[in-house]
Amino acid sequence: MSRTYLVHRHPGQSFLFRSSIPKDLQPKFGSKQFQLSLRCGLLKQAKSLSQHLHNVTQKLYTTIRLGSNQIQIDIDQIKQTLRSELARLSELIPATSLNEQPNAELKANTDPDDKKTSLSDLSERFIKARKDRGFGERTTDDYLDSNKLLIEVFGDLPIESLTHQHGRDYVEILKRLPTNRRRNFPDKSIKKLLRMRGLKVLSPRTVTKHVERISALFNWAIKQGYTQTNVFRGKLEPSRATEVHEKHFTQSELELILGESLPAEAQKKGRPERYWVPMIAAYSGARLNEICQLDVDDILKQDGIWVMDIQQNAVDKSVKTKAGNRLVPLHLKLLELGFLDYWEQVKNSKKTKLFPNLKQGFRATYGDSVSKWFARYLMKLEVKKKGKNFHSLRHTVINKLITNQVYEPFIKELVGHAHGSITLDVYGGKKPLDVLLNECVMKL
């Protein structure tokens, strides 16, 4: 494109169209040239627009020559004609293409880094948005871990520089990374790790989780206007399931798990949590860490009903979502088994936590040790199968309530799921505890 048509004086401002008036018409207009803002900051688009306006002005000049003195027109009128032409084109071309950074004033009212948003910038904004929506600390930590891995693989690139090839490469790199790399290879870079052979690599499930989290990051980025494409979507081919793995326990498995072996496991090493945590999960559907992080004060009587108060109300507590903050009525079976006696015993010992043997670490939750023990316990009972773990108790509760045709909003409130309906989430309110106890919990 000849510089005759295009002018760009200052970065961040619009390109200008410049027309050199033919010498024979300069006396008529009293000028050698004029300029007009294209209201466009994109070079490629500006080139196209300026070429089009050049063609229009050349036709105007020809018409003026042919009409000679019969046509009375000045530069302002030519500019008005060209502005009308730009307006017509703007209806045919997306406004974002024509109007991006049209002038310094508009630029000041937009994010100057939108086109240069780095992966770390995007990650920071995404994590803040997740926390604002009430996502639990562990969930946001998982997202942050995946985001950091992405940056470790590619560097802190501008998000607009990522291509579909990056998406394909990322999946292949994940498949070759070793497990526990930070612990086992703290000083080795991704590049060095990829050169090593004979290592135990990430499981397909872990690879899938990392890819899904990054895809969620870019889906959010698209909705927020930071980018237009999710280059990670669809890059991981779903594995073909050759068999279906039931995630809930059968009735016979549940009876075996909660049978006489369970109190024996608890008494053997003075670990009462090994008895009460599975029992509470089996009669409430609460998540493992929701139970293990309970304080003594979280067991209370409200409206004449004993409840667990599951809340993210301390630095060492977390819930998965805002819906996870809830009161859970205690099943009468737990009271019959002596849970309140255990609670009274811990309370009298002046302990803060309901299960004082359980500890929280830097990367470990209160429930981690119970989770590992429970896996060993299932193997001992020969119940350990693919897809069966502590979380299966939660699946079992939900499956049993659905089978017993319990009203779905009651189930969601019990287990801490959002209703997924504005009407129910905002206007439905919490159900009375006696209704939740009798119409839901006691159906287990």
Image (cartoon, rainbow, N blue to C red):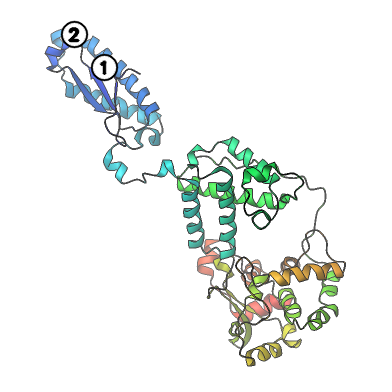
Q: What x and y, as percent, mark residue 126?
A: 50, 54
Tell me which numbered mark, 2 or 1, is placed earlier along the sequence.
Answer: 1
* Quarter that holds the N terminus: top left
Residue 30, quarter of picture: top left
Which-is-in-front pick, marks 2 and 1?
1
Left or right of residue 1, residue 348 in this image:
right
SS at badge 2: helix
Q: Does residue 236 show up? A: no
The one nearer the camera, 290 or 243, is 290
* Residue labelled with disc 1: 57
Classify 366 as above or below 34. below
Q: Residue furthest top?
A: 66
Question: Which kind of residue does numbered mark 1 sit on?
Answer: Thr
Classify 190 as above or below 80. below
* Quarter that holds the C terminus: bottom right
- For mark 1, does the 10 Å Cα neighbourhood hold few (<14), some (14 to 19), or many (20 or more) residues? some
